[in-house]
Image (tube, rainbow, N blue to C red):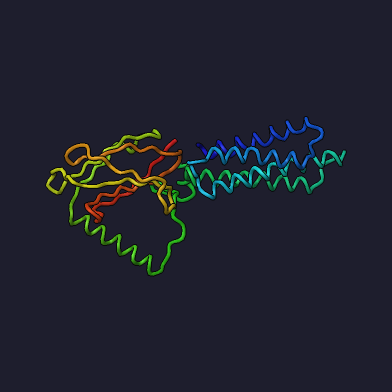
Amino acid sequence: MNTMTSLFGGLAAVFVIYMIGGAIRSLPPILRAVLAGLIPLLAYFVLIIGRWPGLDVVAMHISVFLAAGLVLFALTQFRRHSSGRMHWAPKLLIAFFLGLVVINGTLLYISTQGLPDQVGRWWLGSNGTAVYSGFSGVVPHGQAAARAISSELSQAQREAELGWQVEISGLDDGALVRPFQVRVKDRTGLPVDRVEGELRLLRPGATQAVLVLALDALDGGTYGGVLRLPAGGRWLTELRLQRGHDVLYQDTQELVAP
């Protein structure tokens, strides 16, 4: 489910429900506002069952839907108690919540889609190379971080000594469902068998994988599977090849889905 669609579609639902509630004369405006915010919110909770988008995305929907109901209630109260021009206080309140919606929508777009290429090149600078706007946030400098860096250096050294040639095909397809294959050869060009592999899918900057896909052995030195992206935007795929408990090869690739 597209988060931008759920966010702005829910806003439209808040407005429609509030207008429908106006036809019930016995329904107080504050109750209309509460129902207008809660009904789309409950519908959103039902839609994300089994497809958890993250606590930040859910919190954004909660704040936007309830804020929209509050703004509609404020407008109704002003129309009832005023016959002249709108006071600056409700104007400021409306502007604040409209700005909140715009900022939340922008942050939500960047978190899932990244910066548009032209904006990224202008804002971040580029010498004709690709611009990646996904980042992992603050980098720790404790003992755990030092051990992680040492582990990555050791992994790079093992891969260099191993000399495997790994080719990945099919992940660059633009669809949400992408059959892919991984071909593994040794330094002499012969296929490498008896390898256990997995493909981990996660958002840029996230620490937990959204899904982990085990690779199937297809042919001599060839492994594959079908990657089903749960949503559009920017993703990272982490390929791990191992024998037993030893990870012998690891590679990360960025994907962009519509």
- Quadrant showing the C terminus: top left
Left or right, 49 with reference to 19: left
What residue appears at the point 87 percent right and 38 percent down from the top-left corner?
A: 83
Q: Residue 19 at x, y = what percent?
A: 73, 32
What residue appears at the point 27 percent right and 46 percent down from the top-left corner?
A: 197
The image shows a total of numbered marks equal to 0
Q: Nearer the viewer, residue 107 or 183?
A: 183
Residue 115 in view (yes/no): no
Q: Nearer the viewer, residue 29 or 244?
A: 244
Left or right, 32 with reference to 41: right
Q: Residue 31 at x, y = what percent?
A: 75, 41
Q: Residue 257 at x, y = what percent?
A: 42, 37
Please say if 170 is above or below 108: above
Q: Nearer the viewer, residue 120 or 84?
A: 84
Q: Quadrant of residue 24?
A: top right
What residue appears at the point 50 percent right and 44 percent down from the top-left corner?
A: 53
Q: Quadrant of residue 153?
A: bottom left
Left or right, 23 with reference to 224: right
Q: Residue 210 at x, y = what percent?
A: 42, 46
Residue 162 in view (yes/no): yes
